[in-house]
Each structure stands twice: as C-alpha cells, then as structure tokens.
Image (cartoon, coloured by chain):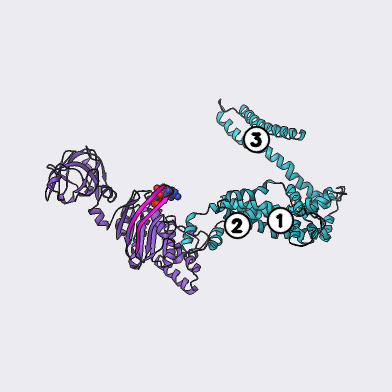
Chain colours: A purple, B cyan
Amino acid sequence: MADLTLAGLTKRYGEVTVLSGIDLEIRAGELIVFVGPSGCGKSTLLRMIAGLERISSGDLIIDGLRVNDMPPAQRGIAMVFQSYALYPHMTVRQNMEFALKIAKKPRAEITAAVEKAARILQLTPYLDRLPKALSGGQRQRVAIGRAIVRDPKVYLFDEPLSNLDAALRVATRIEIAQLKEAMPGRTMIYVTHDQVEAMTLASRIVVLANGGIAQVGTPLALYERPESEFVAQFIGSPQMNLLAGKVVETGARTRVQLEAGGTACSTVPTAPADLGLAVNIGVRPEDLTLTEGPGLFTGTVEIVEALGEVTLLYFGRAPGAGQIIAKLPGGHADLRHARVTLTTAPEKVHLFHAGQSLLYR
Amino acid sequence: MEALILAGGTILAGVFACTAWFWGANLALDLICPARGPQAGRNILRANMVRPWLFIGPAVLFLGLYLVYPVLKSTLMSFQDASGARFVGLANYRWLAGDAKFREAILNNFLWLLVVPATATFIGLVAAQITDRIRWGKFAKSMIFMPMAISFVGAGVIWKFIYDFRAEGLAQIGLLNAFWVWLGHSPQTWLTLPFWNNFLLMAVLIWIQTGFAMVILSAALRGIPEETVEAAILDGANPWQLFFRIKVPQIWGTIAVVWTTITITVLKVFDIVFVMTNGEWGTQVLANMMYNWMFRGAPDYGRGSAIALVIMALVTPMMIWNIRAARRETG
Ligand SMILES: Nc1ncnc2c1ncn2[C@@H]1O[C@H](COP(=O)(O)OP(=O)(O)OP(=O)(O)O)[C@@H](O)[C@H]1O
Ligand SMILES: [Mg+2]
C-alpha cells in the first residue's frame, strides 16, 4: 500500500557529495535490501527516507505525495536501529506504547496492539521489564515490536542484526522473513552488510557504490547477471574470480585467450569486430571444477580450507588475475600443494570489458 | 602588594613542601627497604605496604586536625555554658527549642531549601538544553557560568547594589528600584520587606548556582544516545515531549546529584545573608545565627555549637545520599 519513488535523491554535507541522483522505484509490499561497501551512504539514504536527514536535492515520493518536507512522524514510517535505541527508562510495554500514546490513541486500542505485537515476537513475559534486563536478541525484538505496533506503511531496518551473535542472527533473520510474510502489503527497506541476509530476505537488492546505484535486481539476477565487475565481486562469497585475456574467436560462442595461460569458452555472443578485444572473464569459485585435460587455469594450491560440505582452494596470483579461489563440493584436504587444472561450463563464464567493467553484451 | 607577595610565597612554599614530602618520603622508604640484595622480595612487599600511608598520611592528618577534631570539640561545647567553663547538659538545646529567632531561621532555611535547589536546577536544565541548540549558545553558557567564579560575599555586595534604595526624587542607583520607579511606583527598601526579602536573597544564590547546574546537566544531556532521540522523533514526539519524556528521564540520576549538591550549599548558606541583611527583617538562617552567637557581641560558644550541630545533622544525610547517587552515576 506504499509505493516509494526516489527521484534524483542527493545528499551533500557542505562540499562533500555523499549520494548523488539516486533513482529508484519501490513497489508496495517489496522488501528492498541496500548493500554496499562501508561508508557508501546506505544509512544516509535510509535516514533521508525516514526524514532524519535533510534531502539536499531530488524528490522523495510516498504514495504519490512528495514528502521531502514532511515531518518524520507523518510519513507513516518506522525505523529499527542497529543499536536498538530503546528508551532505557521505560519498560518494554512503555517502549512499545510510546508512539501510540503520543498519537493519543484510545487506551484499549493501545493495549490490544502492544499485546498482539508482544505475542508475535514472544515478548509477553518481558512486558514489564526494563531494556537493561533483556538480552541482545530480546532487545532487538522490542525494537521491532515498537515498529509493528504503529502499523507503518514502510519499515526501515538499519543493520538490525549486526549486534547479535551468529546463531541468534539466523533465528532473528527468519523471524523477520516470517514477519514480512505475515504483512504482505507492507514495504520494507533493509540495510545490511551480510550477504546471506541480503540474498535470503530481499525481493530486490540495491547495490550502492561511489554515491550511486551500481545495480538493482532480484538476488538471483544480481548473482547470475552482474552488470559490472564491482557487483560481480560484491555479490557472492568468496568473490568472483576475474582473469584478463583477449578475444580470439567470435560468434555465438566466444573464446578468450587468458594471460594466465589457459583459454576460456563463453556462451556470451560477440561480433566479428570484437576479435582481439581485451576483456576480463569472471567465474564464480563454486562454478569451477577440477579437470584432467586443458582448462581455464592451472596452478598450485597454496591453502586448503576444508569446511566439510565444501572445500575452498586458494591459488597464488597469476598474471592478469587476482587471487584465484575455487569452491569444490565435499572434502579435498589432500590437494594441498597439488598442481591442478580448473575448468568451468561455458554458460558460467561472464565477460566484462577490460577497463570499463561493463558486462559484454 | 605585601599581601600579594605573602600569598605567592605561601603558595610556593606549600607546593615545595608537598613535593619535598612525597619525593623525600618515597626516597627514604626506598633507602630503608632497598629493592635489591638478598631481601629484595620482602623489601618490595614491605615498601608497598608502607607507601600508600606515606602518600595519604598528610591528607589524613589534616582532615583529622581540621575536620574531625572540630566536630568532636563542637559536640562537647554544645553541652557547655557560654564560655565553656562548665557542663550544662541539654540546656543549650532546650533554649534552641524555645527560641523564636531559631524557629525563624529553621523556617527560612526550609524555605530556601524548597525554592533554591529546584529553581537553580530547573533553570540550569533549561539553559543547558537551549544553549546547546542556539548559535550563540557558547557565549550564553559562559555568561551563565560566570557567577560561579564570584565568591558569595562578592555576589552579596553586587546584589546589594541591585536592591539599593534612594529616597524618592533622587536618582535610583539600584537596578530594581530604577526599574520599579520607571514603571511609575515609588522606590522600595526591598531588603526590609518581610517575607519577600527572603526571596530576594535566594535570587543571589540561584544566580550563582544555575551555572553549576547548567554545566553538569549539559554534559549529561550530551551523553544521551542520539538514536533514542531519533527514535522518539519517528514516534512522533514533539520537542516538548522529547525533552521531558525522553531526555530528562534519562538523566534523572544527574539531576538528583545536582539537586542535592545545591541543597547542601543552601543548608550552609551564610555569606549572602551576612552581607546583605545580617539576618534582620525576618531573613535569619541557621548558619548566620550560629555565627552571631559564636563570634559577635558577647560570644556564647555553647549555643553557637548547638546550632552548628543542628546544621550538621541536617546536612549529613543529604551528603551521604549525594555521594551514593554520584557513585551510582559514575560506576
Ligand atoms: N555529518 C557528516 N558530514 C560529512 N560527511 C558525513 C556525515 N555523515 C556521514 N558522512 C559521510 O557519508 C558517507 C556515508 O555514510 P553512511 O553512514 O551512510 O555510510 P554507510 O553506507 O551506512 O556505512 P556503514 O556500512 O559503515 O554503516 C560516509 O562516507 C560518511 O563519511
Ligand atoms: Mg550505516
């Protein structure tokens, strides 16, 4: 029920431009995840939507209404902070009631809303406790509860799970997913550093970099068709391998001679004029397999990380390539110091213009 | 000039004596228990047991001399007659209970207690909040804090001028009368107006203590996590609600410490009353009454001491509570 339009949203601090010309359409019911390197302006963008940060230029439109100058409380938005930001002098119940009391809602309605939220978040036994008597996970749930009771049109989350330990993070992530499921009409915008959170929660991911949007798409689209080397390496873990080379055969199938020695075949089509073009090929570690015959890359395994379900192989730097990493299913502890050849299926090979970093298409 | 040299010399001598003591005593200890040779380990242990006493020794000594001894002596004297020649039992206290001036002093002190800490803390709190928001806040802050640097006696003299009276028709040099006359009234001898003159005296202490409250509370306000304020803004709180329902409750501990600290100052208030009215016209307070009995006219050490002990009995619980609260704040 809440469509958001960001049109040319720009944020300047004096001379410094932190975000410039952000254009984004968010449809009601979406769960949008902002990712990007630290300091790229994710929190700033979220805070501009919330109204905590002034918009330097551009328009923010919620449900067809320009809200640039509307006070935060009237935008129909609730925000969950990384530090929880609970009111330390109020009990859990008072924390959740606060917004409704300010809005002068009838007592019965307030009680009903708080108790419903407490039930959903399993906070009922803690309603009369102060935040300092709660665990980190419980505090985060109170922060979410405080948002829920207001029944906002848009939920904003700024790295809500980053202060929790690994197990709790998984559990709370699933709770947020269930919450979203239960409120299909509500729009959510979620900032995170965590790949898994981004991939599992998002209906669409927005990758921010250098003050702008690098790419927007569904998690799988970003994973399968990254439009730039930056996105290719940002999404997926370990990051995508990049190797420099030259196009030696064009057509429906493209063959690339790699500086590191091997050759790669890609299903990305190229025109005859591209013969001899300098490109970077990208291959995800999990798409690499061992081969006996000639392949993409031959090298000596320097480090083996056997994680049980998968094994990570780290190779030394090759000419025209960063560190090459391969992710093989199962255990391969015996491969340490072995000299092996890696290959991949042609449809798994991404092509990027060397220098411009754009997908070859 | 001579006084200046004397003061400077005293400061120098004091600093030198302190340094000499800490340095010399430390050195002597190291000589007596050298940290080497066959007994090194034992010597280090011993030296470490003695060293703290060397360092706090002077403080303990002076505290004993100037604090503990006077308390004991005063207690003793409060049970003795005017010259301290013989014991009179509870006679001094019985006299206090029946004395009209003492009742007035107690009542006035109570009035001071009700008005000054609350007003100074409240104005200080508001000033702390406002000066953090406005552009010339830093300047305003230093102006509000300035009176803290003035002694109570000095402040009393300044405010005496403000309340000064000149006969009707003459130019009024007192600020208050000048204003009052400008409004079209006839000039007043403000400090002799019964009951209300108490508040005129209180204004002086409030003027002084507001700066203290402001500085402490301003630091506390800055310590409030910014996110709780932002969360409240998103929850729809207006600036008023933000201040009284989100910020103030988070600094209650500090407010209490400021409040009680000023309360203690109020209980001991003396200089202002002494300078401005000397307790006349219904403005007597305990500390000034004690001074009068103790040191003026024909001194009565017994009655003076009894009043001193009453003041101490009032201050001590406040003091204990204050220290506890301050510890909670910092620990
Ligand atoms: N008040 C300010 N003045 C100047 N620059 C600022 C100010 N606030 C933030 N910035 C800059 O804006 C940029 C974006 O900050 P922001 O907090 O939005 O980053 P982020 O993407 O959320 O980073 P992280 O992932 O570390 O939380 C940073 O480079 C920061 O230095
Ligand atoms: Mg951030």
x, y (%) of residue A26?
32, 62
Q: Earlier in the sequence, mark 1 or mark 2?
A: 2
Q: CA distance from mark 3 to mark 1?
A: 46 Å
- Asked whether, in this view, residue A88 is left or right of residue B66, the answer is left
Task: Report if the beta carbon of the residue with label 3 is closer than 8 angstroms to ligand 1.
Answer: no
Q: Mark 2 and mark 3, same subunit?
A: yes
- Mark 3, chain letter? B
* Comes first in the chain, label 3 or label 1: 3
Report the disc number at residue B291.
none
**Vertical position of residue B184 compared to residue B53: above or below:** below
For label 1, the residue is B203
For the residues labelled 2 and 3, the Cα–Cα distance comes to 46 Å
Would you say the beta carbon of the disc 2 residue lies within 8 angstroms of ligand 1? no
* Label 2 crowd (10 A; few <14 / some 14-19 / many >=20): some
Residue mark closest to the camera, 3 vs 1: 1
- Which region of the structure is painted magenta? A4-23
For numbered disc 2, what is the local secondary structure?
helix
**In the rendered structure, which amino acid carries the disc numbered 2?**
Val
Disc marking residue B54: 3
Q: Secondary structure at mark 3?
A: helix
Reading the image, the residue beneath label 2 is B126
Q: Does the residue at mark 2 contact the one at mark 3 (Cβ under 8 Å)? A: no
Q: Judge whether residue B172 is colored magenta.
A: no
